[in-house]
Image: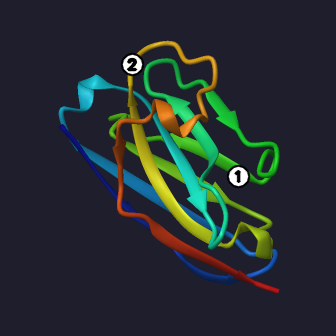
Amino acid sequence: QVQLVESGGGSVQAGGSLRLSCAASGYTPSIGYMGWFRQAPGKEREGVATISTGGGYTWYANSVEDRFTISQANAKNTVYLEMNSLKPEDTAMYYCAAARGGWYSLPLDAANYNYWGQGTQVTVSS
């Protein structure tokens, strides 16, 4: 089993920045990917960014590319999401998720992820 704990959410004005953190514990060698997803009220959950824990390869949603950066700590059991130039449409609950190792044709597909954190709220005001 893997446990995920997010931190770093909050409220910010448009154009501002936030940094989210996600710490994994438990059987972390089983993790192949760690990613961030978000869900706004009345909308479906969408993949934001993910990173392969082995090779450090990254994938981003088109809506956040060039504004968000996902990275991992050297120990590879903590991932970060640096969010810059935030927009009101980025307002959502952000969830950290972990997937077992393997190859996925759609790395940002939530169906690939086995473990989920409780979420942290990000609110961007105009």
Residue 113 vertical position relative to residue 69 in the rendered view, above or below: above
Mark seen at residue 68: 1
Numbered disc 2: secondary structure:
loop
In the rendered image, which quarter is residue 45 located in? bottom right
Mark 1 belongs to which amino acid? Phe
Residue 64, given in percent of the width and then of the height, sits at 77, 51
- Quarter occupied by the N terminus: top left
Q: Nearer the viewer, residue 2 or 111?
A: 111
Residue 73 vertical position relative to residue 68 in the rendered view, above or below: above
- Residue density around tag 2, few if under 14, some if 14–19, many if 20 or more, within 10 Å: some
Mark seen at residue 101: 2
Residue 61 vertical position relative to residue 21 in the rendered view, above or below: above
Q: Is residue 95 left or right of residue 49?
A: left
Mark 1 and mark 2: Cα distance apart in space? 24 Å
Q: Is residue 103 left or right of residue 13?
A: left
Mark 2 belongs to which amino acid? Gly
Residue for point 81% across, 43% down: 62
Residue 65, given in percent of the width and then of the height, sits at 79, 45
In the rendered image, which quarter is residue 57 located in? top right
Residue 69, given in percent of the width and then of the height, sits at 66, 47
Residue for point 78% across, 54% down: 67
